[in-house]
Amino acid sequence: MRLYRYLFIALLLSLAPFAAAEQLLMARVNMTFPEAMLKLQETIKQQGYTISRVQRVDIGLTKSGYKTDKYRVVFFGKAEETEQLTKKFPVLLPYFPLKIAIFAEGNDTLITAYDPLLMFGESEPLLARAAQKWRSDLEVIFSTMREAE
Amino acid sequence: MKTLRILLIGFFVSLAFARPGFTETSLQQRGAMLYAQHCASCHGDTGKGGTGVPLSNTSFQQQVSDRFLFNTIKYGRPGRVMPAFSQLDKQDIQAIVKHVRTFSSARPPKLSMAKITGDISNGKELFHKHCASCHGTDGKGGKGTGVTFSRPRDLPIIAPALNNIGFLKSASDQMIKDTLMQGRDNTPMVSFLKQGLSEKDINDLVAYVRNFERYQQNYDHEKYKNEPLMIESESPYDLQTTIDNIKRAAVGKNFRLIRVQNLNAGLVEESKENTSQVIIYFCNFQMLNEALAIDPRVGMFLPCRITVVEQAGVVKVMAINPKRLSYLFNNDELNRLCGGMHDTYLEIIEEANL
């Protein structure tokens, strides 16, 4: 049992450099912006999160006379987790809810987010575990979006 | 114990599939997989470019060696968006290079690694006359990131930073010379032979560019990693007064208020929202436009916001630390903007707490 535990820890450590290497999570989605936008919200919900709001970034820029492309920020989270973790870890307050930026690039769409593990992975174990979970959820979301057609 | 055993077996089986001996086919497959994972979001699935340069460009493929591609992946361009993929081993990088070569039928060049000598002072003069308008007076390159938001879409690339240590480690003298002699199709880079320069002039230019190695400034990317995650201050006022003060201070700094909402709004029913955690969103569209031009991915930290919370009778004001977030982007230009935004957040918070 102990041997397996050591081996398992070694396994996790061997994966750590890969996890730490990507500072920004990014994916190119082979979909037009409106299609990708719908797919992203659906994928986030499938991971058990609630979409709290979608912020239009482009509209303010256009109204102010700047030339821009379609750009949104999708905010999402889990009510109970938000309540509990922000009380325990105030450092999360400026970063919550979680978010993904989505913007058009020609006929494709790009999505991007920061890596929660990189930001909070070296914190107390409870927060580090939460960051690991967000990271793996984001990986699923980004991977699903990358493969979507 | 059973779960651990299954996980371990699964891990070793996956390793066996992930590194299948690097036959020609498996190298290509691995290259395609790694490219999709690490490169496609910036350079496009087929290398047509985007945030990153268009790798499928025929003359690019004809002019750059495998060594250039390999070292570019390995060392990146410190401070110029392209990260160093130091976590990838030699075989992984070779696999990616092989995949990049599938984007074009153009043959990669066989470049000499010999040093090209030339008159540096003449090279400097020629550089300022012919190159500085695009590549900057000291070779620091064009502004912005890729095509999105950064500049008009009729330009497929931004002028590379020739003084960047990543570029200098990757490009041989011969490669720089060939690019100067032939230009690069479908980019603003023209043939300077056709522009009337002699081969000797071009050698002088190469010597001048290579000379940038002597004036390298270390891009201390890691210092941003040590910045605190947030800016935080205790308010002497009650929650509502603090919120009003923040709003007033933000408007005073030329920001437009977008919205004030409880942090868990949208996650719970309105009646159950936590009214002691409040976010104030605001925006300066000129600053936003500037930030997106430098790097379109900064949207993940937008709009600007300050969070005000009341816990056990104490009111605290908090904001993300833009300097800390700047660490994620490997973009020296963005570091400066984030430094300015950090100071602006501080000023707003200090003014609100006066």
Image (tube, coloured by chain):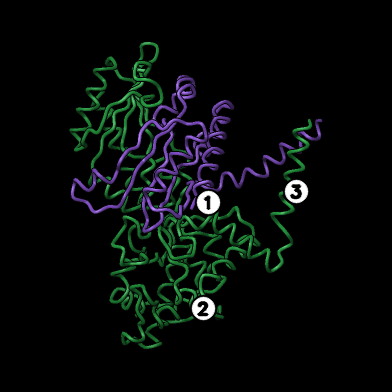
Chain colours: A purple, B green
Q: Nearer the viewer, mark 1 or mark 3?
A: 1
* Distance of label 1 from label 3 (alpha carbons): 24 Å
Local secondary structure at mark 1: helix
Looking at the rendered structure, the kind of residue marked 1 is Glu
The chain identifier of the residue carrying mark 3 reads B
Residues at marks 2 and 3 on the same chain: yes
Residue B26 appears in which quarter of the rendering?
bottom right
Residues at marks 1 and 2 on the same chain: no
The chain identifier of the residue carrying mark 2 reads B
Q: Do the residues bearing badges 2 and 3 touch, measured as CB atoms within 8 Å?
A: no
Local secondary structure at mark 2: loop
- Name the mark on residue B106: 2
- Name the mark on residue A147: 1
Q: Where is residue B49 in the image (x, y as percent from the top left)?
A: 42, 63
* Front one among B220 and A55: A55
Q: Which of marks 1 and 2 is in front?
A: 1
Residue B143 visible in the snapshot? yes
User: Disc 2 or 3, which lies upstream in sequence?
Assistant: 3
In the rendered image, the vertical position of residue B113 relative to residue A136, given as above or below = below
* Front one among B137 and B85: B85
Looking at the rendered structure, the kind of residue marked 2 is Ala
- Name the mark on residue B294: none
Looking at the rendered structure, the kind of residue marked 3 is Val
Specify the quadrant that holds the C terminus of chain B. top left
Q: Position of residue B275 (x, y in %)?
A: 34, 17
Q: Where is residue B296 in the image (x, y as percent from the top left)?
A: 36, 51
A30 horizontally vs A121: left or right: left
Q: Where is residue B274 in the image (x, y as percent from the top left)?
A: 37, 18
The chain identifier of the residue carrying mark 1 reads A
Local secondary structure at mark 3: helix
The residue indicated by pointer 3 is B13
In the rendered image, the vertical position of residue B179 relative to residue A6, given as above or below = below
